Image: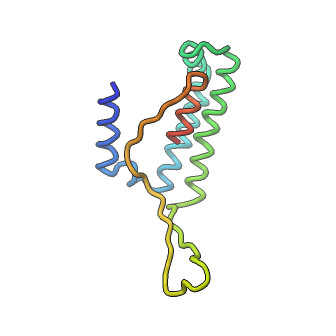
Amino acid sequence: DVDAAVKAARNTFIDGTWQSFGAKGRAEVLNRCAELVSEKASCLAALETADCGKPIDESDWDMEDVAGCFAYYGDLCASRGEMDEEVDLGEGSEDFRGRIIKEPLGVVGIITPWNYPLLMAVWKVA
């Protein structure tokens, strides 16, 4: 399963699918994830409880946080645009320009703890 997931993620990264969405498109995807989590919160909470054994009330709260995390990063993506900005290099640097470009670097592996598996995964994915 891990090898198949890494291969699929790598292929998507290489073919540029995610990057081609642009900031607005990525924001739409993340905000749609927030909507879907909210719509399916009770089912996801039940799965979370079955997975890690926490009380269902806690899993219900976690799903609110999961949806909120997707929405936060979706809104951040939309408000910050393409994440390409010039920076001031300070006094004496008039002949130079500084630029920060934030872009995906590739496929990463994540490790999540047992007590908040979905929320911690979303922190890393979103």
Instruction: Name which quarter of the figure residue 56 lies in.
Output: top right
Compared with 123, 63 (above or below) is: above
Compared with 86, 70 (above or below) is: above
Where residue 34 sits in the image (x, y, percent)? 58, 37
Q: Colour scheme used in the picture?
A: rainbow
Q: Is residue 51 left or right of residue 18?
A: right
Compared with 126, 117 (above or below) is: above
Q: Quadrant of the N terminus?
A: top left
Where residue 24 sits in the image (x, y, percent)? 50, 55
Q: Residue at image x 50%, y 66%?
A: 100
Q: Residue at image x 54%, y 73%?
A: 86
> In terms of depth relative to the viewer, which is nearer, 18 or 103?
103
Where residue 61 sits in the image (x, y, percent)? 69, 26
Q: Residue at image x 59%, y 28%?
A: 39
> In terms of depth relative to the viewer, which is nearer, 91 or 4?
91
Compared with 106, 23 (above or below) is: below
Number of numbered discs on residues: 0
Where residue 101 sits in the image (x, y, percent)? 47, 63
> In terms of depth relative to the viewer, which is nearer, 77 or 98?
98
Q: Is residue 109 left or right of residue 1?
A: right
